[in-house]
Image: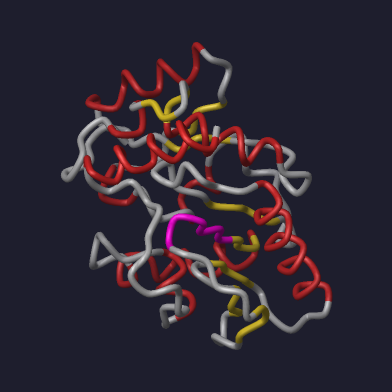
Amino acid sequence: SLQSTRLPGKVLMKVGGKTLVERVAEAAKASPAVDRVMVSVPTESADNPLAAWLETRGWEVLREVSKADVMNLAPLLASPGLRTMTSDDLIVRLTADCPFADPALINMVAAAARQAIQDECVEEIGFSGLLATRTDRVQEPTQYPPGYDVEVFSVGLLRGCDGDMDRAWARPSEQMSDWVLEADPPCLPGLSVTVDWWQDLEWVRRVYQECG
């Protein structure tokens, strides 16, 4: 969304010659686990320029929810492009303010989620700092800073919890995975590579300038 309160318009700001939203969308497209990339844009008119900008560059845009519900994935399943998905299909969620999104990490989390579903031990697996299941059991001890977040949900889980969305989303800032996991997986303290403020953007730009 262009309506960020801390850094308005940040998703179209550039780092290393590309916008934040491009960086994240391209990371998703580069992952072998992802066969289709859709960018969810809020329905408010203030985000029309973002939707138009994405469409002119060939990205598939989905406009089903308002900014207040932008983290809610369940209503997106009613869109024409997603109605044919089966309960075992997976949805990978990334946010456009994480320009260090890693295709290999996306693939790792999606593969773990697929294996867990095949083993019938969980319906959902999410990554935020480290890999954790719905019951918050640690699957992988490696820790990453916020900004490398990858969340993977089965379509069956999202359809099953859709009836509770009004209750679950009473707090607009609540993450979908927080509601499902009912706990925040631990992450590296004092370090974040998410672009929330102008100084974050400047730091990310310096990293891309130095490292390419």
Asked whether residue 147 is drawn in magenta, I would say yes
The x, y position of residue 168, in whole percent, is 34, 71
Q: Position of residue 2 (x, y in %)?
A: 27, 32
Q: Quadrant of residue 198?
A: top left
Measured as percent of width and height from the top left, residue 158 is found at: 55, 63
Query: Residue at point 61% right, 61% down?
Result: 152
Figure check: 140 above or below 196: below
Among all residues in the image, which is located at the extreme top? 56
Membership of 66 in magenta stretch: no
- Location of the C terminus by quadrant is top right
Compared with 24, 88 (above or below) is: below
Q: Quadrant of residue 3?
A: top left
Residue lying farthest to the front in this orientation: 210
Query: How many numbered dots are placed on residues in this image?
Result: 0
Horizontal side of residue 108 vs 165, given as left or right = right
Q: Residue at x 47, y 78 (%)?
A: 185
Does residue 164 appear to the left or right of 74 in the view shown? left
Question: Magenta segment range?
Answer: 146-151
